[in-house]
Image (cartoon, coloured by chain):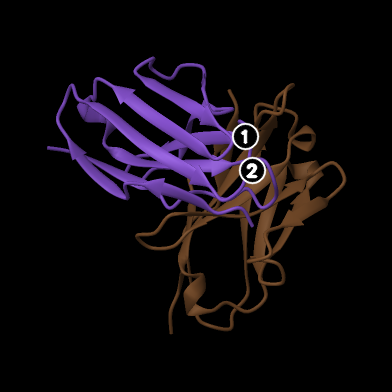
Chain colours: A purple, B brown
């Protein structure tokens, strides 16, 4: 299985901050990388697909970049409603493994 | 509008069997793979496997192969996840999700069910 390693596992930031999460794959996955947001008590929601494409309806403060084995997810201008856990997921090779998640809290 | 609606919470004893469901609406159910994702208490997401309702093609994660069975009823637009003999370690929320395949390699879970909490306790 391809291992996905997210960093950090948790972080605390202030409203308006720029927040960055990284995701590293154990092998080259090209741009086959998705990002999901999971708010407490809710199902996950797709935010970014193919490493950098914003899902329809997702605010433009969310963005993604990277290819190969290293990827980043950024929130430019953190809002209070962004409190959630964020997961990367590779879709290059079955099983489509998730990272361990990054829990984002507001300071 | 596209929806996946899952069956309600279950409380079972170790050794019992269980089948939970995921009903699709608002789209052609047989044309999209359905995936299952486990979330153990306080933990992250685990990809369990996917099933194509049109021909019952199934791809299990090695971690879940032999532990669960995926199936579907095309006539009722419903996917199922079942256990033959539950263990306490099966306690988790189980999500179903629709797999969307885009034109240039896009492969995502774009629609999710609300989750089914399964509690296994003696």
**Is A87 situated above or below B105?**
below
Residue A87 falls in image quadrant:
top left
| Nearer the observer, A80 or A102 | A102
Q: Quadrant of residue B66?
A: bottom right
Residue count near mark 2 (Cα–Cα under 10 Å), binned few <14, some 14–19, many ≥20: some
Q: Residue at x 66, y 65 (%)?
A: B82
Which mark, by number, is residue A18? Answer: none
Closer to the camera in the image, A90 or A57: A90
Q: Secondary structure at mark 2?
A: strand
Residue B73 visible (yes or no) = yes
The chain identifier of the residue carrying mark 2 reads B
Q: Which mark is residue B23?
A: 2
SS of the residue under disc 1: loop
Q: Return the x and y of residue B75 as percentages of the image width and height.
A: 81, 43
> From this viewpoint, which residue is outermost toward the left?
A107
Query: Residue at label 1?
Result: A32
Rendered residue at 16%/26% (across/down) = A15
Inter-mark Cα distance, 1 to 2: 28 Å
Local crowd size for mark 1, using a 10 Å CA cut-off: few (<14), some (14–19), many (≥20): many
């Amino acid at each position: 299985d391809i291992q996905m390693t997210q960093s950090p596992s948790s972080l605390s930031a202030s409203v308006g901050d720029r927040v960055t999460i990284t995701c590293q794959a154990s092998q080259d996955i090209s741009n086959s990388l998705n990002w999901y947001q999971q708010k407490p008590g809710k199902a996950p929601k797709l935010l970014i697909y193919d490493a950098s494409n914003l899902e329809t309806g997702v605010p433009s403060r969310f963005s993604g970049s990277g290819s190969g084995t290293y990827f980043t997810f950024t929130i430019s201008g953190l809002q209070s409603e962004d409190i959630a856990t964020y997961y990367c997921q590779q879709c290059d090779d079955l099983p489509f493994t998730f990272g361990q998640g990054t829990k984002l809290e507001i300071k | 509008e596209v929806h996946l609606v899952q069956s309600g919470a279950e409380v079972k004893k170790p050794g019992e069997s269980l089948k939970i469901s995921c009903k699709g609406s608002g789209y052609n159910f047989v044309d999209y793979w359905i995936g299952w994702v486990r979330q153990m208490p306080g933990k992250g997401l685990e990809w369990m496997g996917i099933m194509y309702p049109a021909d019952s093609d199934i791809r299990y994660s090695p971690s879940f192969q032999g532990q669960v069975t995926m199936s579907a009823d095309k006539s009722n637009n419903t996917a199922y996840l079942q256990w033959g003999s539950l263990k306490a370690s099966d306690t988790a929320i189980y999500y179903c999700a629709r797999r969307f395949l885009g034109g240039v390699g896009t492969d995502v879970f774009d629609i999710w069910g609300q989750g089914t909490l399964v509690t296994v306790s003696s």
